[in-house]
Amino acid sequence: MSPTARVLIVDRSRESRDVLCSLLARSGAEVLEARETSRAAQLAAAAQPDLIVVDAEPTHGICEDSAARLVAAAARNDAPIVVLGAFKRSASRFPTAEFVAKPYQYPALIRRIEELLGSRT
């Protein structure tokens, strides 16, 4: 992974964000994080991350408007979005996203993130 890769993690779970942030930082990424998609959309517009990871469980109540703004911000920077969810329909607000089913293994998720970031160079 490029040491300058910037990854935005969007997850309501503090524990999940902490684990992903630690693993990605060890891989050399600069990591940004947000609990809600509304804040993530603001961060994505300002910081222009190279990749966005979104936990999109239906119980998380992702707002249509903030999801659309997050997708638009990602598109402006050609940043892939990786959606984590138990069901494929969890990704419906992120139509161009890569879907990773839960439960996932962190090493496999990090490898997929690294592959997506590697394809951007």
Image (spheres, rainbow, N blue to C red):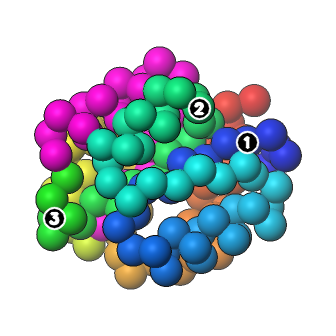
- Spot occupied by residue 111 in the image (x, y as percentages of width and height): 66, 62
Name the N-terminal-most of marks 3 and 2: 2
- Spot occupied by residue 86 in the image (x, y as percentages of width and height): 26, 72
Q: CA distance from mark 1 to mark 2?
A: 12 Å
Residue 35 showing in the rendered view: yes
Depth check, front residue: 102 or 18: 18
Residue beneath the point at 30% across and 66% down: 85
Residue type at the position of mark 1? Ala
| Farthest residue, direction top | 76
Q: CA distance from mark 3 to mark 2?
A: 27 Å
How packed mark 1 is, by other alpha carbons closer than 10 Å (few <14, some 14-19, many 20 or more), is: many
Q: Is residue 28 above or below residue 87?
A: above
How packed mark 2 is, by other alpha carbons closer than 10 Å (few <14, some 14-19, many 20 or more), is: some
Name the N-terminal-most of marks 1 and 3: 1
Q: Disc 1 or disc 2, which is closer to the eye? A: 2
Residue type at the position of mark 3? Pro
Residue beneath the point at 59% across and 50% down: 32
- Specify whether 45 is left or right of 92: right
Quadrant location of residue 97? top left
- Specify whether 99 is left or right of 76: left
* Magenta highlight on residue 65: yes
Q: Is residue 27 above or below residue 5?
A: below
Residue beneath the point at 52% across and 55% down: 33
Residue denoted by label 2: 47
Numbered range of the magenta stretch = 63-85
Q: Secondary structure at mark 3?
A: helix
* Magenta highlight on residue 20: no
- Spot occupied by residue 117 in the image (x, y as percentages of width and height): 67, 42
Residue denoted by label 3: 58
Residue denoted by label 1: 5
Residue type at the position of mark 2? Ala
